[in-house]
Image (spheres, rainbow, N blue to C red):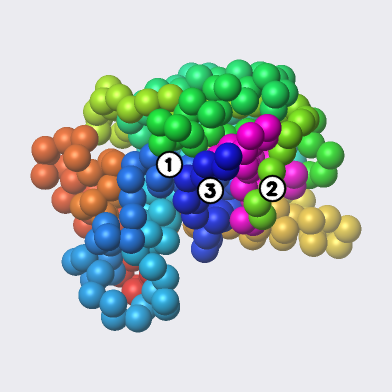
């Protein structure tokens, strides 16, 4: 017997963080997001009218991307200057995150609470040991996530280490890897298992999310990074110019430009997990206008 939950491939579009890309795909069926769910288009300020700006992307694809925007924003990661699991940086611009860092608690607990799900997390378990838990979750309509991380074999391995469990067979589990490849595993071990077990009411408020973002933006590491950049610019040589350009353009500029755009999409939309956390239209409209002016008003999709 084989039982599978339909799963959207990941990553999709400009999704540089493999954990959030996997999580967004894992949560789409749990949230019962289907092709019938309309998509709120931020540039148009209305539900999708099939104007063609998004190409031939389906509603479920666009809503899945919005989920990615919202998850990376609510976690606060969209307001850092680096991805917190990236070991190539000497320090991180997110509070309480060291190098190396492996999605430690309470990070996952806060994120799953925001999404509205309960979960069980287990470490260093084999496929056979977890088979019963996976079967129970799949039968209830929930997915799971698995990863082998530890010390990365390559600098960018963290981007693709998470996979999503979307089904089971008589003696194994069905896994989708980063990039959409599907495999069936009957043996082997994963260092990290996150199994979704049920739904719950989010206990966080809109203020909690804004407070988290403020704490990240005001973290001393941001001032430290600013001083480091000025020092680097004052000490440019022929030998370090290329490396410095890569650091500034790809890292210091590239990460926040992309992630702040994700945050803009999340705060402007009126149809995602973040929007209903408050009825205070004044603060929501202020943030919407701010992000729209700086990130979306140029017809970015």
Indicate left or right for 288 with 115 as reference.
left
Q: Residue at x 66, y 55 (%)?
A: 181
Rendered image: mark on residue 27: 1
- Sequence-wise, which precedes: disc 2 or disc 3? 3
The range drawn in magenta is: 156-180
Helix, strand or loop status at disc 2 = strand
> 102 and 228: which one is in front?
102
Tell me if I can see residue 86 in this picture.
no
Mark 1 vs mark 3, CA separation in Å: 10 Å
> 121 and 51: which one is in front?
121
Image quarter for residue 31?
top left
- Expressed as whole percent of the image width and height from the top left, the position of residue 106 reads 48, 19
Location of residue 256 with respect to 150 vertically, above or below? below
- Expressed as whole percent of the image width and height from the top left, the position of residue 88 reads 74, 40
Magenta segment includes 210:
no
Mark 2 vs mark 3, CA separation in Å: 18 Å
Q: Nearer the viewer, mark 2 or mark 1?
A: 2
Location of residue 16 with respect to 39 vertically, above or below? above
Q: Nearer the viewer, mark 2 or mark 3?
A: 2
- Sequence-wise, which precedes: disc 2 or disc 1? 1
Q: Which residue is mark 2?
A: 183
- Expressed as whole percent of the image width and height from the top left, the position of residue 297 reads 30, 69
Q: Which residue is mark 3?
A: 21
Q: Nearer the viewer, mark 1 or mark 3?
A: 1
Helix, strand or loop status at disc 1 = helix
């Amino acid at each position: 017997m084989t039982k599978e939950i339909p799963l959207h491939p990941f990553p999709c579009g400009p999704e540089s963080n493999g954990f959030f890309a996997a999580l967004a795909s894992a949560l789409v069926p749990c949230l019962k997001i289907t092709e019938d769910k309309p998509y709120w288009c931020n540039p148009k300020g209305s539900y999708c009218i099939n104007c063609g700006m998004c190409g031939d992307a389906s509603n479920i694809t666009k809503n899945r991307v919005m989920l990615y925007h919202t998850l990376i924003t609510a976690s606060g990661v969209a307001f850092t200057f680096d991805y917190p699991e990236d070991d190539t940086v000497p320090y991180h611009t997110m509070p309480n995150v060291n190098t190396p860092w492996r999605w430690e608690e309470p990070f996952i607990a806060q994120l799953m609470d925001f999404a509205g799900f309960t979960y069980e997390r287990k470490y260093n378990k084999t496929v056979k040991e977890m088979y019963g838990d996976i079967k129970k979750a799949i039968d209830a309509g929930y997915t799971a996530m698995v990863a082998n991380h530890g010390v990365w074999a390559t600098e960018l391995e963290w981007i693709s280490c998470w996979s999503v469990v979307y089904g089971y067979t008589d003696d194994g589990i069905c896994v989708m890897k980063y990039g959409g490849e599907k495999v069936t595993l009957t043996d082997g071990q994963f260092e990290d298992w996150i199994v979704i077990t049920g739904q719950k009411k989010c206990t966080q408020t809109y203020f909690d999310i804004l407070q988290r973002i403020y704490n990240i933006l005001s973290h001393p590491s941001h001032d430290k990074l600013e001083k480091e950049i000025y020092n680097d610019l004052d000490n440019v040589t022929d030998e370090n110019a290329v490396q410095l350009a890569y650091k500034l353009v790809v890292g210091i500029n590239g990460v926040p430009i992309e992630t702040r755009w994700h945050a803009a999409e999340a705060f402007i939309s009126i149809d995602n997990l973040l929007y209903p956390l408050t009825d205070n239209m004044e603060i929501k409209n202020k943030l919407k206008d701010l992000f729209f002016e700086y990130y979306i008003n140029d017809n970015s999709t």
